[in-house]
Amino acid sequence: METEQQTLTDRKTILSGITPSGRLHIGNYFGAMKQHIELQQQGDAYFFIANYHALTSRHNGELMRRHTLDIALDYLALGLDYTKCTFFAQSDVPQVTELAWILGSLCPVSLMEKAVSYKDKVAQGLSANIGLFTYPVLQAADILIYHADVVPVGADQKQHIEITRDLAVKLNLAYNRELLRLPEARIIKAVATVPGTDGRKMSKSYNNTIGIFDEGKELKKRVMSIETDSTPLENPKNPENCNVFALISLFASDADRNEIARLYREGGYGYGHAKKALLDMVDAYFAKARDERKILSQNEDEVHRILRLGGEKARERAESVMKPIREATGIVRHF
Ligand code: ADP
Ligand code: TRP
């Protein structure tokens, strides 16, 4: 489901995850995290750090611990309120891997072979391991184990949600019972794909990102590196096919955006001017979150406490969904 509106009308279970695989960028923010933070008020919301998914592409314990904590700090600094939603680490809910195995046993190999993200990642040089191949099965379990209704994600995750629905139908059909609920993707049209500094999709795999918590020289370097065409300063320019303008549109009010578009078309306004305007916008937009993050990072124990609390709530819900599945599948527990 692509949507332009921000408000959900009836109270639903909302769920999304983010992989702790490096420094977060403004594509992650506008494509996913911003919605997550807005949605935490509008339903029974679950947000988690997908550390098992990160394990499909990296094997360094120290980095995993670091990135997990970093993402938790990022989310909390950006305004995720753990008292309003359930915020936790994927690996704190063992029922997820349990369900993933059951779903995997119903999943045709051909369904995984069609998944574009696997092919993309292998094409980028990641090793073609089984975890990476069955990544969408684990993602389906993540979603289905909480009976999620709505999954806010960026456009690149659409196929994974379709696979999730397919697998839910397969389990329900196999055991002739409504064991799992079918979720819907929620993709905001305007920010479906945030462009990176080279004009491709902003992604940590392309080294074309602007980090949410970048500041000072680093932020300036990133913004100034955005690729543009070579139209001379004095000539009129088309804002619609400019990466700098696309990014400005994410930060600016409608009035500011229209004014900058007018300056582009008028001529005498260079890409350097536009980049400077963008730099100021990014800097101001995330200033409060940057300060908040510095404070939070002084108290890592508190972050672990928050994740522990979220994990407890998530496990309770997951267990209530898992029980009837164990019954239906005949997988009896002896403990
Ligand atoms: P990356 O491509 O940098 O590895 P992830 O795949 O970890 O990012 O994505 C995390 C979340 O952010 C997903 O919901 C994804 O759809 C969203 N996202 C990532 N990059 C973008 C982008 N350039 N535009 C919009 N959303 C994005
Ligand atoms: N695959 C997602 C990504 O790359 C992360 C993710 C894991 C996820 N499990 C999820 C997103 C469940 C939504 C729901 O961004």
Image (spheres, rainbow, N blue to C red):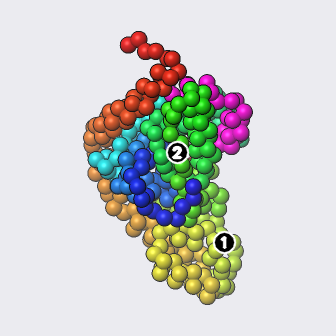
Say the numbered circle drawn on residue 183: 2
Q: Which residue is identified by label 1?
A: 241
Residue range corresponding to the magenta coloring: 99-121
Quarter assignment of residue 227? bottom right
Q: Is residue 101 left or right of residue 10?
A: right
- Number of numbered labels in the structure image: 2
Query: With respect to residue 201, does 47 lie above or below?
Result: above
Q: Residue furthest front?
A: 176
Q: Residue at x 68, y 30 (%)?
A: 108
- Say which amino acid is labelled 1: Asn
| Quarter the N terminus occupies | bottom right
Residue 111 part of the magenta-drawn span? yes
Q: Position of residue 322 (x, y in %)?
A: 44, 28
The amino acid beneath tag 2 is Pro
Asked if residue 216 shows in the view, the reply is no
Local SS, label 1: helix
Query: In this rendering, is residue 2 above or below 181?
Result: below
What secondary structure characterizes most of the magenta part? helix
Q: Residue at x 56, y 36 (%)?
A: 168
Q: Which mark is residue 156?
A: none
Q: Residue at x 64, y 30 (%)?
A: 107
